[in-house]
Amino acid sequence: MTGRWTIRPVGFVRSAIRTPGDAPKQGALEGTEAEIVVSPEFAEGLEGLERHGLGGKIIVLCWMHLADRARRKVHPRGQEDRPMRGVFSTRSPHRPNPISLYTVELLEIRGNVLRVRGMDAVDGTPVLDIKPHSPELDN
């Protein structure tokens, strides 16, 4: 299938991380906190999310808007002393369709704002989707 597709963000990330260089490598492992601000037009889509429990996990898909979409090879983890590999064999943000997937801990829901732990996205990163995590389906 070819052609253009339109994806509308449902919100954005609010984070202390201002540039990709500020992001810790694999920030989920470091417990980095962020907020997901859901646009008012999609806020009713959050109804029922609390049933999965605070402290539970959710999945967040983002568009890494600062990524270099032309890259096909990268140094793993940005370490130039390591040989280059194809982007599909790494977790580099630089890829043809820079979609990130985070499994994060849901800490708080305040209206249309979710506070989460385990997200190393840059401030302003568009959020494409939010889903409850299901250990039976997602492992």
Image (tube, rainbow, N blue to C red):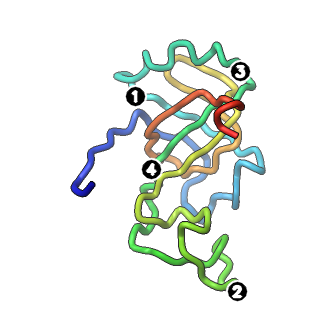
Q: Secondary structure at mark 1?
A: loop
Instruction: Name the spot of residue 42 as percent of width and height, x first.
Output: 39, 23
Q: Is disc 3 surrounded by few (<14), some (14 to 19) or many (20+) residues within 10 Å?
A: some
Residue at 43%, 40% in the rendered image = 128
**Of the residues under marks 3 and 2, which one precedes in the sequence?**
3
Q: Quadrant of residue 25?
A: bottom right
Q: Secondary structure at mark 4?
A: strand
- Judged by depth in the image, the label closer to the viewer, 2 or 1, is 2
The residue lying toward the viewer, choosing from 93 and 109, is 93
Instruction: Give the residue number, with chain letter if any, for mark 2.
Output: 81
Q: Secondary structure at mark 2?
A: loop
Disc 2 marks which amino acid? Asp
Compute the Cα span from label 3 to label 2: 41 Å
Disc 3 marks which amino acid? Leu
Disc 4 marks which amino acid? Trp
- Judged by depth in the image, the label closer to the viewer, 3 or 1, is 3
- Judged by depth in the image, the label closer to the viewer, 4 or 1, is 4
Instruction: Give the residue number, with chain letter if any, for mark 4.
Output: 63
Q: Which mark is residue 111?
A: none
Q: Quadrant of the N terminus?
A: bottom left
Q: Is disc 2 surrounded by few (<14), some (14 to 19) or many (20+) residues within 10 Å?
A: few
The residue lying toward the viewer, choosing from 14 and 2, is 2
Q: Which mark is residue 39?
A: 1
Compute the Cα span from label 3 to label 1: 21 Å
Instruction: Name the spot of residue 69 as percent of width and height, x first.
Output: 40, 67
Instruction: Give the residue number, with chain letter if any, for mark 3.
Output: 54
**Of the residues under marks 3 and 1, which one precedes in the sequence?**
1
